[in-house]
Amino acid sequence: MKFLNVGFNNSVSLDRVIAIVGSEASTSRRLKDEAKKLGKLIDATNGRKTRSMIVIDSGHVVLSSVEPETLLARQEDLLTRKQ
């Protein structure tokens, strides 16, 4: 099983990631608000500014202070690595 580092020693199972999105768009803010209302918001920012949001297959939304481009690069690196 591979884990995606989302910052500050926090990880998400790579198999469960559905989407990695930026946090600036109004649709992202609505997604965050809805997840919070449903109790499915996980804050992994360690008090820093939210730069990206990771949607996982359980419907949870993980907030990260790492840029979406960096997370995508980490994901690609993990996917291309041999077992």
Image: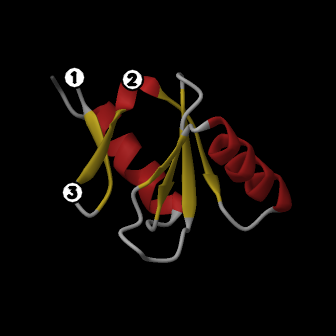
Q: Amino acid at mark 3?
A: Asn
**Labels 2 & 1 near each other (Cβ < 8 A):** yes
Left or right? Give the position of 29 relative to 57: right
Q: Is residue 63 above or below residue 56?
A: below
x, y (%) of residue 1?
A: 22, 22
Q: Earlier in the sequence, mark 3 or mark 1?
A: 1
Query: How far apart are the alpha carbons under marks 3 and 1?
Result: 17 Å
Name the residue tied to disc 1: 1
Q: Earlier in the sequence, mark 2 or mark 1?
A: 1
x, y (%) of residue 65?
A: 45, 68
Q: Amino acid at mark 1?
A: Met
- What label does residue 9 carry, if any? 3
In percent of the image, x 21 and y 57: which residue is there?
A: 9
Name the residue tied to disc 2: 15
Helix, strand or loop at mark 3: loop
Q: Amino acid at mark 2?
A: Asp
Query: Which dot, 3 or 1, sits closer to the camera?
Result: 3
Q: Nearer the viewer, residue 76 or 40?
A: 40
